[in-house]
Image: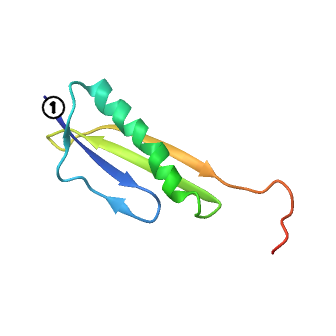
Amino acid sequence: MPRDFFDTDDGDDRFQDDEGSDFRDARSARDAAVGSLPEMAGDRLAGGDHDSLTVRVRDQDGTLVYSATLDLVDEWQVPQSRS
C-alpha cells in the first residue's frame, strides 16, 4: 500500500507529517485530505475574518501529488453592538 504524507497550513501554523498513512489508492488519500479540512475549519471558527486552510499530500518519494485549500470568510452583514 502506498504511504502518503499530509502537510497542513492554517495561516498560523504549519505541520509537516513525518509518519504518513497508508491508503489503498490516490483517490482514498485525496478523500482523506479533503475530509480533514472541515475539522481544521472548526478549530479556526473563533479566529479572524478570513482564514485559508491548506492540506498537501506528498507521496513516499516526497513528491507533491495533491493539494486542497478551503477559504473561510467570516463577516457580519449588519452592524454589531458591543455588549
On screen, residue 11 above or below 39: below
Residue sitting nearer the eye, 83 or 3: 83
The image quadrant of residue 25 is top left
x, y percent for residue 68 = 43, 40
Quadrant in the picture for the N terminus: top left
Q: Residue at x 27, y 56 (%)?
A: 16
x and y, in percent, of residue 71 in the image: 56, 47
Report the colour scheme: rainbow
Rendered view: 24 above or below 78: above
In this picture, residue 40 sits left or right of residue 19? right
Seen at 45% across and 44% down, the residue is 37
- The amino acid at mark 1 is Pro
The residue nearer to you, when weighing 38 against 25, is 38
Q: Nearer the viewer, residue 66 or 24?
A: 24
Task: Name the residue at the bottom extreme.
Answer: 83
Q: Is 8 on the left or on the right of 61, as rendered?
A: right
How many labels sit on residues?
1
Residue for badge 1: 2
Is the residue marked by circle 1 packed among few (<14), some (14-19), or many (20+) residues within 10 Å? few
| Rendered-image quadrant of the C terminus | bottom right
Which quadrant of the view contains residue 82? Answer: bottom right
Which element carries disc 1, helix, strand or loop? loop
Where is residue 58, by image quadrant?
top left
Q: Measuring 29% from the left and 32% from the top, which residue is drawn there? A: 29
Q: Residue 36 in the image: x percent, y percent?
A: 40, 43
Residue lying at 14% horizontally and 41% vertically, measured from the top left:
61
